[in-house]
Amino acid sequence: MQRSTISSLRRLAAIGAVAVGAIGLAACSSSPGGGSSTPTGSSAPVTNALATGCSLPGSGGSPTGHTLNLSFFMDPGQPPDPDIFYSGQGLILTTNMYEGLLQYAPGTATPTLEPSLATKWTVSPDKKTYTFTLRQGVTFHDGTPFTAAAIKPSFDRRTAVNQGPAYMVAGVASVTTSGKYQATITLKKSNSAFLTYLASAYGPKMMSPTALAANKGSDNDQKYLTTHDVGTGPYMLTKAEVNIGYELKAYPGYWGPKPYFTTVELPVIDSSSTVQAQFKTGQLAAILHDIPSSAVKSYLGDKNVDSCTQPSMISQYFYVSPHRGMLTSATDRLALLKAIDVNALTQGAYYGRGSTATQLYPANMMPAQFAKQDVPYDPSILKGIVAGLPAGEKSLTIGYDSSQPDAQIVATLISSQLDTAGLNVTVTSYPTAELYGWPSDPKSAPDLLVTPGWPDASSPYTWGHISFDPGAGLNYTGCSDPATTAELAAGLVSGSNADFSAAAISAEATGCWENLVNVTDFQVAQPWLKGMASAHVVSDPFTVLLADLSA
């Protein structure tokens, strides 16, 4: 379901994910002026591998008025309905129209929970009861006051729509209120990651119960929310024309600081060269996604633009099928992984916006000492194995999603490297829809697969479960391991980095997965646009918090 280079990995990522996530957060509460200071999933800061932020502080020139002109390279492909939207390109709509109880702090590489519509929270020792104090003075875009009474209808609507993000509220047993601004959410089972669900860009957002009731129809508001919104965010949806463009306008009654930009225009421009040309002439204020690798180097060297190398949780992953020929052996699969020169891939495909991965999980999820990958480059092992194979077993296919130009580059480079080991590797593209059929029919997947992705939230479980567990939405090649599954399940309850690290070590031993490159969220902006670095959230690809931008 790629909408841009990697945005489609969100659509079906949580199929089969019934209780995804795990972070050890004991009874956290925020101060009135800030959120919990505990990084999710870690007890120490996570060091980002690349210098982050933007090269210019925002200076020189000026926009025309208070309209911000951005663009989509392709239509988001799903309505800007937070209970349905599960892609990447298009988050700029849902994250600026809607708010959840919590959020991740922007402007940092360490995912840190902070208040949004909840100002304080506590967690019971068994991680089943979550109590929230809510923000007062907030209204939905239809004027309805936000109170504790909005939480259950918002959760119920997500359950009724039952799309990909529905799993985040599937474990809720009850929502009770105590007055207008106190709510308690009780879960059916312990889930140490529940707070990260609430902060996730794909997590449950608060929706006006008045608007939901008035527009429910026979589809639980789905038609209505293709062209309207019912959120509390700083912006309202004022235009939504598929394949043409979208428009946001600042909500006059927003509870927080009023946005500098009162209108945000997001036309769909399906030509990268046209997008770059309009940016060069100043018609676009920034390019937030789908910048070709060939253009990155020129932007990094251009002193007249603001190049933003933003921290992210995006990774370029490599999958090995265990179903055919030499690949049925874990020893041979590991030998194949060791024959890949990952540093060469990083330089060849992700110059200036990627670093060689050192952990099996995506970057910025866990401290560096956990989940370490141990796949030293040594092509001689594979050469010895291939030399003893019958001629008919030396041919492999490496696939990539046809909408991912960077994945194509990586696949081609890997093909060349494996060819030198004596294999005959064919590079083949596959349409996005075909990839999502493979978890239910993994033997139809290619021998090898290169595809990027990112987790729903900062919990290692939100990546490990959907990638490593049997039948999960991103387990394209159908590899699994009982020890990995058990360790992930233990981590879901404990929130322990040690459990998740053990799961990663077990998964690595299968030879089915390798995290190749940690990819930054590379964006460029006009030098007059201020706040790009501080408006970026590490867990949210291809977007920024628009209310944090100014000129």
Image (cartoon, helix red, strand yellow):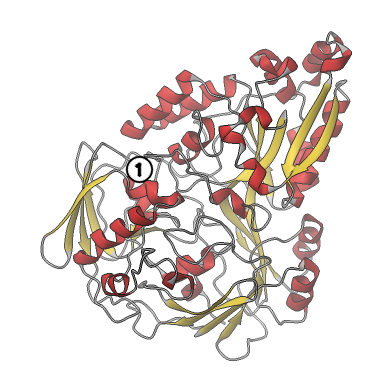
User: Residue furthest toward the left?
Assistant: 179
Q: How many marks?
A: 1
* Residue found at x 31% / y 76%: 140
The reply to whether residue 51 is visible in this rendering is no
Seen at 72% across and 50% down, the residue is 404
Q: Which residue sits furthest bottom?
A: 65
Q: Nearer the viewer, residue 421 or 63?
A: 421
Vertical relation: 290 (above or below) 38? below
Query: Is residue 543 toward the left or the right of residue 337 in the image?
Result: left
The type of residue carrying mark 1 is: Ala
The answer to which quarter of the image holds residue 498 is top left
Q: Is residue 530 visible?
A: yes
Q: Quadrant of the C terminus?
A: bottom right
Dot 1: element: loop
Instruction: Find residue 524 and report its horizontal and vertical position in percent.
Output: 68, 67
Locate residue 525, reporting x and y percent: 66, 72
Q: Which residue is mark 1?
A: 193
Q: Is residue 26 above or below residue 8?
A: above
10 Å crowding of disc 1: few (<14), some (14-19), many (20+): many
Judge from the rendering whether residue 386 lies leftward or rightward of residue 46; answer left or right. right
Q: Position of residue 197 (x, y in %)?
A: 37, 50
Residue at 54% x, 50% y: name it: 10
* Residue drawn at (67%, 76%) of the image: 526
495 shown above or below 432: above
* Horizontal side, residue 34 vs residue 105: left or right: left
Locate residue 341 relative to residue 481 in the image: left or right: right
